[in-house]
Image (cartoon, rainbow, N blue to C red):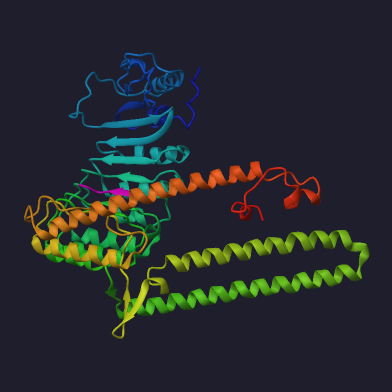
Amino acid sequence: MTQAPPPVSDFEGYLAYACSQLEVDVHLVITRVQISPEPSRHTTARHEKKVSKVSTAGTKPEEPKETQTENTDKVDKHRKIGLLSFRPTGDYTDEIENQVIVTTVYDHNTLVQIKFEKRIPREMLKIIGLILPYQQTVTSLTLKKGLVHYTMHELRHFIPKMPALTELCFDGSYLAEANFEVLLDDPTNLRVLSLARCCIDDLVVEKIAEKISHRQAAKKLTALNLSTNRITDIGAKHLADALRRNRQLAYLNLNDNLITDEGAKEIFDVLKPFPLTMEEVMAKKACYIKYLLKKMEIKSDSDDEEITKSKLSVSQSENNTKKASLNSVKTLQPNKRTDSAVSKESELLDEEFKYPFNKHNLINKEGLTYCLGNNNLVVLNLAYNDLSYLTLKKLKDVLDSQIELDRQPRGLMKVCIEGNNMPSSCQELDQIKEIFQCNEVVQEQKKKNSATLKKKTKIILVWLVWARPSATSSADWLPGRRRTPVSAADARYLY
């Protein structure tokens, strides 16, 4: 009697089962990590992190010191079912030729993170692509070592089917083709992309910068890690060109690269007011014309709706026998169109406001059009490059410019420049530290003010509910008939 396959929602069990059924020649080792809940005063040793390992050798998996939960036992059972046809071996070291190491991280029995090590065969990658769309809670996916050209293309197919996936990590993975940019083509919810230690050069950076400047990724990606690569001033110039238009990226890590003062200057120049090029001016005009056309279309739809509404009213007054049907049409159809028109107008205004070269972000100076600069980049890491005192002065100018404009969000809040050829103490460095300290104090004060305002608003609302009498009659609202005494200063809250 054949054993029933595990459910596809069981990632570990179904992966092992599918690999065995399709006879994929791999040595699969799965490590399950259970994140323990937040400790309390009654916390004991049983709340510590639980790790269990399962391999395809047919050996008994290592049980943790504490008793496994019921859900974990079921998963281990399904894994054993899928491991029957695997080639037995007694040792699981990195020297095994076809070994694939998978680590799954669970938070309160919910799969949130998956990590792959070693090269994944294409047949197994396709199986993973079929299983992952059913893992609707996975937020992070990590692939290390052994990437090949088809890996990115396979990932491109199933990543858009994972709405919760927001983080991709390829740290330490060398890919000869370096086609990481294909992941930024399709609309996804990807917010964090980490490509540290991937031997990326300026050509790859140019392709990535193009995607985060014009494509769908420009609206979602908030953090980009390019540390410990081979990026020079040319790559920094490509990233600076992307930051001219990108208003979503908040974290950029260029630690341990080959950037000099010239490359840092290119990035800093777009963080303060900069003149628009002729191409950007033409693109701005084209975008404004498109905005006006959409606005006219929405207005035309609204006018048609009013005409339809008036015709329905006339028809209703003339024909009393169809009153009920006309009333239903009158109440449902125009309201639906109204909601649609309001929604379209809201999306249009939101799109116009987020456009980097809209009227709110432009100024005219000396006959030229200037953009007020990118103030959405909050964290910039330029540590361990080839920077000098000139970059320090440029950074001071950028911070002064962002403070003078006083735009929201504020701009740079943290810049890392250690490991460069800079003086350990100078006037500019002291001023920069003082600016960042003031920014932290301002942000903390804003949080306190916001919390205080919410608390006062809640107190006022509670007081209004308590002080205001129930309107049992019109006479109850008269000041002379009020049940609860109210001072003259507080009467304005009630009338």
Quarter of the C terminus within the rendering = bottom right
**Image check: 91 left or right of 128?**
left
Can I make out residue 271 in this image? Answer: no
Residue 116 falls within the magenta-colored stretch: no
Residue 402: image location, x then y, percent:
28, 64
Q: Is residue 263 above or below residue 420?
A: below
Q: How many marks?
A: 0
Say which of 329 and 487 sits in front.
Answer: 487
Q: Give the residue at x 36% y 40%.
A: 140
Q: Is residue 338 above or below residue 256?
A: below
Please report the bounds of the magenta region as a residue range. 191-196
Say which of 168 and 247 sits in front.
Answer: 247
Residue 22: image location, x then y, percent:
39, 32
Can I make out residue 221 in this image? Answer: yes
> Hey, which residue is sitting farthest bottom in the picture?
367
Residue 382: image location, x then y, percent:
17, 54
| Res. 320 image quadrant | bottom right
**Image check: 336 left or right of 432?**
right
| Res. 299 image quadrant | bottom right
> Hey, which residue is sitting farthest right in the picture?
321
| Res. 39 image quadrant | top left
Q: Is residue 32 above or below residue 439?
A: above
Residue 451: image location, x then y, percent:
44, 45
Q: Give the residue at x 23% y 40%.
A: 145
Say which of 311 and 368 sits in front.
Answer: 368
Q: Is residue 263 above or below residue 125?
A: below
